[in-house]
Image (cartoon, grey):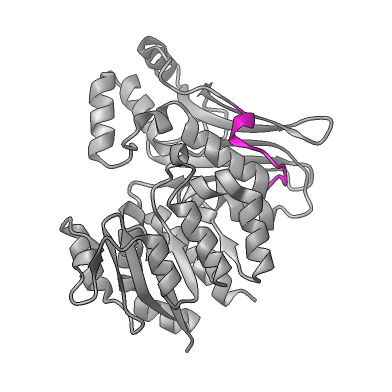
Amino acid sequence: MPTIRYVLIGLGNLGRRFCEIVQEKDADLRQRYDVDLRLVGAADSRGAAYDLQGLDLADVVRLKTSGESIAAYPAIGKTGWEAKALIEAAEADVMLEASPVNLPQHAEPGLSCIRTALEKGWHVITPNKGPLVVAYQELHALARSHGVKLRYDGTVAGGLPALNIGRRDLRGAIIHRIEAVPNLVTGYVVDMLSNGLTWDTALARARAEGVLESDAAWDLEGWDAAAKLTILANTVLDYPAQIEDVTRAGITGLAQEELVSACDRNFCYRLLARAERRADGGYNLSVAPVALGPDHPLGRLGSKQLGIVFHTDIYGTLTTIIEEPDPIPSAATMLRDLLDIYTED
């Protein structure tokens, strides 16, 4: 049974839950996939811990659940040990990068961590959108030059395998249009407003549940959806888009009266990301709130559902929807990507 040694950067909502998933599924993973997953290093914003023999996942989860840093890990944790320095010092096979997106700061520290890991010849798995938005072509070229894999299916629409479907299952097709609701919190907030809650109450509830970024504008002004659409365009459409190419409008300009009226007519507003194929083979990219009727494939999305529709020439129209009441499906994408690398035919 091969031992896969991995380093985990970021122990927030996704990183901690990934540890919980692997801890719970350890025996099943050994039996079904013949793999032994060993966490040898981990870092958060306050420090890091490293042991080539492996960290105890239960201890990692206990520390993070109690609000402590991984730097408090018994005997080996170090305060102030930065993630990039940990990667430079560690021996491993793969890095999982789950730090905050941080696009205003050029996607750091995630981008530097990914570069360093690829240069060391490690496979990289990340649900972090930032580095892919900032340096998509560079990171793919770096992975190719070092003969390793870069996987990031969790960067788009939470646990929904949008990238896998688009690039693998729709091979050979021309995709005329993509319509996606890839951001959960905007739909959740809109539905609360449609039901009569005030903006302040809706945002407070979203923050309390951990689904609204600390910088609310990232979600509410459509930046998150635009970042995800940029990754979709590059990965699925082979269209070299930048986030600046996306025409963007968020939900903050919506009048509550219109939201209530739409709901009364069985329409639901969603922040819709679109890619429309042009005659020249390129794509027009946009993010904007749209009132979707019950006849639209995404017109009946629940408050915590995400979805994507692919309109193709040879596979017809394909719609996929996911219910994501908590971050577990998003965290599980790292396991999906890891198994894709190590158990592919």
Rendered residue at 45%/21% (across/down) = 266
Rendered residue at 36%/13% (across/down) = 256
Magenta-tinted stretch? 236-246
Residue 60, compared with residue 28, is above or below; it is: above
Q: Position of residue 307 (x, y in %)?
A: 52, 41
The answer to whether residue 202 is left or right of residue 287 is left
Residue 101, compared with residue 180, is above or below; it is: below
The residue furthest right is: 280
Q: Position of residue 149 (x, y in %)?
A: 60, 67
Rendered residue at 66%/51% (across/down) = 137
Q: Does residue 38 appear anywhere in the picture?
A: yes
Q: Is residue 219 magenta?
A: no
Q: Position of residue 261 (x, y in %)?
A: 41, 12
The answer to whether residue 297 is left or right of residue 24 is right
Q: Is residue 239 magenta?
A: yes
Rendered residue at 56%/66% (across/down) = 118
The residue furthest left is: 66
Q: Position of residue 13 (x, y in %)?
A: 31, 52
Q: Total label count?
A: 0
- The C terminus: image quadrant: bottom right
110, 180: nearer the viewer: 110
256, 113: nearer the viewer: 113
340, 127: nearer the viewer: 127
- Magenta span main SS: loop
Residue 78, compared with residue 197, is above or below; it is: below
The answer to whether residue 30 is left or right of residue 195 is right
Q: Does residue 127 appear anywhere in the picture?
A: no
Q: In which quarter of the view is residue 241 placed?
A: top right
